[in-house]
Image (cartoon, rainbow, N blue to C red):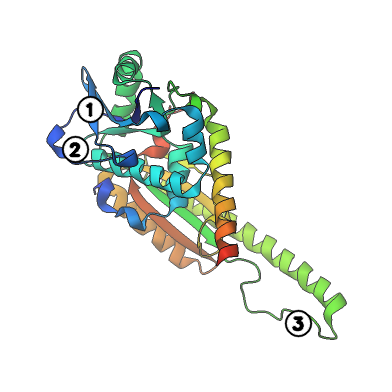
Amino acid sequence: VSPAALPAREIALVDLLDRLLAGGIVLAGDITLAIADIDMVQISLRALITSLDAAERDA
Amino acid sequence: MSAATYTYAVARPFDPAQAAGLVGVDGAAIHLVSHQDLVAVVSPLAPAAADEAALRARLETLAELEAIARAHHGVVAAVAACAPTLPFRLATVHRSDDRVAQLLRREHRRFRETLDRLAGRVEVGVKLYVQRAGASAGATPVAGSARVGRDYLRYRREQRDQRQQAWRRATAAAEQMDAVLAGLAVDRRQHRPQSAELSAAPGENVFNAAYLVDAGRAEELAALARRLGAENPQVTIEVTGPWPAYSFAGSEHGERT
């Protein structure tokens, strides 16, 4: 079974973000975003919710 | 401000021809930074995109976050198809390839150990949903009808009770399923239940877990999860993957920072 078996377009963003924002090995990069990773999760999810709200209003 | 280096993953060495044409964030071509028996899979990040404020602003914009996340995953999935791969958290950025090489030297042992643990294994995601309260057929009091007042309060109370009962049943079902699936898996991680706003989900997400399995058993685990879900009409199961082992890239006893 290849991990690439699932075409990218079929992957829900929310499933991807579970893994990319809460998974993956955390290393302090030179640009300090990685250090504030918990904040980043919250910020990103807030961005997601806000954007979806806006999209619904527009629809 | 100079260009920076975005790292997707560390992997066991593989034929670079297999990564030919692979592009990452902002369409930048991928290259490898090597140190002994490890390679870091990286791409350059343009100077304008490479400071914290710029990167943070992008991650706070849904379209940009999605583009970066999909680009990141595209690279990790392609590399994972070639060699044992240790995925990095989204947006790990260093000042240069040299800084990434230093990272490989400094964390060599930890990277090797983790790659050994993940080699030949994939992650399968399993989510369990319970139908949203109110989604079931029922007599919703019609606004403007004579019965509104007290009937409405009773209706709300019943809805809440039904919801709690359904949630308890679903949680119990999830625990049973989890115990069975964990028997097939090498390891498991639980993610936070997904917010209903974030997806066109078939109900309310009660349980959201990832299982690390030998690649050859991924189908078996997925089929078992679907079968257990089908046996229980109260819940809906959704299986995702197989994924590169994102949820298991941290240390075995929780993540270190």
Residue B9 as seen in the image, left or right of residue B58: left
Q: Is residue B73 above or below residue B11?
A: below
**Front-lying residue, B32 or B15:** B32
Same subunit, labels 3 and 2: the answer reads yes
Query: Numbered disc 1: what chain?
Result: B
First along the sequence among labels 2 and 1: 2
Residue B126 image offset from top left, x and y in percent: 44, 52
Q: Are marks 2 and 1 in contact (CB under 8 Å)?
A: yes
Q: Residue at x 31, y 18 (%)?
A: B104
Q: Which residue is mark 1?
A: B32
Q: Which residue is mark 2?
A: B19
Number of other residues with Cα within 10 Å of mark 2, as a class: few under 14, some 14 to 19, many 20 or more: some
Q: Residue at x 51, y 62 (%)?
A: B201
Q: Disc 3 on helix, strand or loop?
A: loop
State which quadrant residue B223 falls in: bottom left
Same subunit, labels 3 and 1: the answer reads yes
Q: Which residue is mark 3?
A: B142
Q: Mark 3 belongs to which amino acid? A: Val
- Quote the CA–CA distance across marks 3 and 1: 64 Å
Residue depth check, mark 3 versus mark 1: number of the one nearer the observer: 1
- Quote the CA–CA distance across marks 3 and 2: 60 Å
Q: Disc 1 on helix, strand or loop?
A: strand
Residue B96 image offset from top left, x and y in percent: 33, 20
**Front-lying residue, B8 or B154:** B8
Residue A23 as seen in the image, left or right of residue B22: right
Q: Mark 2 belongs to which amino acid? A: Ala
